[in-house]
Image (spheres, rainbow, N blue to C red):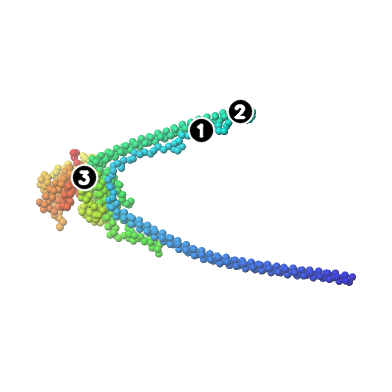
């Protein structure tokens, strides 16, 4: 019993020891596992920290790169902005240069063109649009075919015929298909008929439009032919219309007014043109533009006042020579022997605020003399001086000159539709005056103008009518004036007689005054001599200046 107890006691002690060992082993394993987990966690934390540091480094690098890119972008944007501003300035300077060049080339631009107007070019084309029917009406509609409806329908044969009712069903289907085909055929006939009706209606409308168009074209061709016949025959209105068309076709810079008036004297073959000139402010004040990068502003350099004055004077001269050139070159039937040009400016008087139309240039040019000019090489100012033009010395300041011929006076002279009897007292007709009365009128006129005038004894014609004295020192002297109340053009012989009388009388100047006009030979003879020719329009203008309203109505031929 004692051994047995000891055996069990050892077994119990051994089991307890094993259990304790297992417990301790379990504790150690748990501690090792805990330490392993701790090591893993520390390792994970270290790895996480490393990754975070790496991410932070990456973020810092990306941030630096981003900042660099941002700065480079800002630099590029600033560079592009500066370049755009410089380009803007370049475009402004190019436009400025183009504007000035267009002004400087006003005369040159017309020299390479033929200013004659072809009358055939005024006739509209006889071509009328070809009739093109709508696509859905252009082709006949395709007619249905019986086969489209019968299709694969076939009579039963062979064994199929033995099937009860097969033959009857076939006949019913065949009858139905033929009936449908007949209806489709009728519908096609109806649609095709409608198509033809619609097509014929459109064709009839086209044909009517074509007939109306051709009738209108024929009428316009007849009008052009009538216009050409009238022009060739020397009809005044036709000549005025033709030359107005010539001036209308003349291309100027857009800023120019392009307004004009034209009238014509059949007696002297003189065309008078009054052209609206641009005002001096047409010239840009800026000489050039520059970009100030520091201030980010576009600044301009002002054009000098003398340059503005010279440019404007050049524009006035160019328009004058150009207009005269175009009119003479366009003359197809030698209707024009003399062109008188008045350049006026529609502006405002700064002193009064009222609208004014000062004449800043006036010139009378003879065909033969003018057509010998080489306008591509002339000095414009010298050319106009040679033509004896009246040119404002300060055109840019709107200082006016006396027109060679006042347009309104010329224009009124040839208007005969007014009530002559009703206006006789208020506006006397100079043609109703006796020759002696007309000589008195001329004498009084120059007396009113400041000359000491004395009427001479009547000498019929060719003698001295008025002797006048200009009392101004140095530039004054004796003036011989002859008055011609004529209805026909005054020829060169009257001008020669005046010049001879001047020589005999020892006069400084001679003046010939007429109610009509002068021929080309008269102007040519007086060109380089101290002789002034005053026609009917000029006479009316001078009378108007002293407050006398008169008119010249020629008696019937």
Q: Quadrant of residue 551?
A: top left
Under tag 2, what secondary structure? helix
Q: Which of marks 3 and 1 is nearer the N terminus?
A: 1
The residue carrying mark 2 is 167
Q: At which x and y percent is residue 469?
A: 13, 53
> Quick check: marks 3 and 1 in contact, CB under 8 Å?
no
Q: Give the quadrant of the C terminus.
A: top left
How far apart marks 3 and 1 lie (CA) works out to: 80 Å
The residue carrying mark 3 is 269
Number of the front mark, 3 or 1: 1
Q: Give the quadrant of the N terminus.
A: bottom right
How far apart marks 3 and 2 lie (CA) works out to: 107 Å
Label 2: how many Cα within 10 Å (few below 14, some 14–19, many 20+): some
Residue drawn at the location 28% of the way across and 56% of the way down: 311
The residue carrying mark 1 is 144
Q: At which x and y percent is residue 243?
A: 26, 45
- Residue found at the very far right of the displayed protein: 1
Q: Which of marks 2 and 1 is nearer the N terminus?
A: 1
Q: Is residue 219 left or right of residue 25?
A: left
Q: Earlier in the sequence, mark 3 or mark 2?
A: 2
Q: Is residue 423 above or below residue 27?
A: above
How far apart marks 2 and 1 lie (CA) works out to: 27 Å
Residue in front for this viewpoint, 140 or 483: 140
């Amino acid at each position: 019993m004692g051994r047995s107890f000891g055996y069990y006691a050892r077994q119990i002690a051994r089991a307890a020891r094993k259990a304790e060992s297992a417990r301790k082993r379990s504790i150690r394993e748990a501690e090792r596992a805990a330490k392993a987990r701790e090591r893993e966690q520390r390792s994970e934390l270290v790895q996480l920290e490393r990754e975070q540091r790496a991410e932070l480094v990456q973020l810092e690098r990306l941030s630096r790169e981003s900042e660099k890119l941002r700065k480079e972008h800002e630099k590029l944007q600033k560079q592009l902005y500066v370049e755009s501003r410089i380009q803007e300035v370049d475009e402004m300077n190019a436009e400025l240069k183009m504007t000035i060049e267009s002004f400087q080339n006003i005369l040159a631009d017309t020299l390479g063109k033929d200013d004659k107007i072809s009358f055939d070019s005024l006739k509209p084309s006889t071509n009328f649009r070809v009739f093109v029917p709508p696509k859905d009406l252009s082709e006949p509609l395709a007619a249905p075919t019986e086969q489209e409806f019968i299709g694969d329908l076939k009579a039963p044969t062979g064994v199929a015929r033995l099937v009860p009712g097969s033959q009857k069903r076939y006949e019913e289907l065949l009858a139905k298909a033929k009936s449908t085909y007949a209806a489709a055929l009728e519908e096609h006939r109806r649609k095709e008929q409608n198509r033809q009706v619609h097509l014929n209606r459109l064709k009839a409308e086209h044909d009517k439009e074509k007939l109306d168009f051709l009738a209108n074209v024929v009428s316009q061709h007849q009008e052009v032919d009538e216009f050409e016949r009238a022009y060739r025959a020397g009809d005044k209105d036709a000549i005025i219309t033709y030359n107005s068309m010539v001036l209308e076709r003349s291309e100027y810079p857009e800023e120019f007014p392009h307004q004009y008036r034209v009238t014509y004297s059949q007696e002297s073959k003189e065309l008078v043109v009054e052209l609206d000139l641009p005002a001096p402010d047409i010239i840009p004040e800026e000489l050039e533009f520059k970009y100030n990068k520091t201030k980010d502003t576009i600044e301009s350099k002002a054009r000098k006042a003398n340059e503005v004055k010279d440019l404007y004077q050049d524009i006035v001269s160019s328009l004058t020579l150009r207009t005269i050139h175009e009119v003479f070159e366009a003359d197809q039937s030698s209707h024009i022997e003399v062109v008188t040009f008045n350049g006026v400016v529609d502006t405002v008087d700064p002193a009064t605020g009222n609208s004014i139309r000062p004449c800043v240039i006036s010139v009378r040019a003879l065909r033969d003399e003018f057509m010998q000019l080489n306008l591509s090489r002339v000095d414009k100012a010298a050319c106009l001086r040679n033509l004896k033009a009246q040119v404002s010395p300060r055109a840019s300041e709107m200082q006016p000159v006396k027109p060679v011929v006042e347009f309104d006076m010329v224009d009124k002279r040839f208007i005969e539709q007014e009530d002559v009897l009703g206006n006789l007292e208020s506006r006397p007709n100079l043609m109703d005056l006796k020759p002696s009365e007309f000589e008195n009128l001329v004498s009084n006129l120059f007396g009113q103008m400041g000359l000491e005038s004395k009427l001479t004894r009547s000498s019929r014609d060719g003698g001295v009518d008025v002797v006048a004295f200009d009392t101004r020192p140095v530039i004054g002297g004796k003036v011989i004036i002859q008055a011609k109340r004529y209805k026909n053009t005054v020829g060169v012989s009257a001008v020669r007689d005046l010049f001879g009388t001047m020589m005999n009388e020892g006069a400084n100047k001679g003046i010939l005054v007429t109610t009509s006009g002068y021929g080309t030979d008269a102007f040519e003879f007086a060109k380089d001599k101290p002789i002034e020719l005053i026609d009917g329009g000029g006479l009316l203008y001078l009378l108007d200046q002293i407050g006398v309203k008169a008119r010249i109505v020629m008696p019937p031929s």
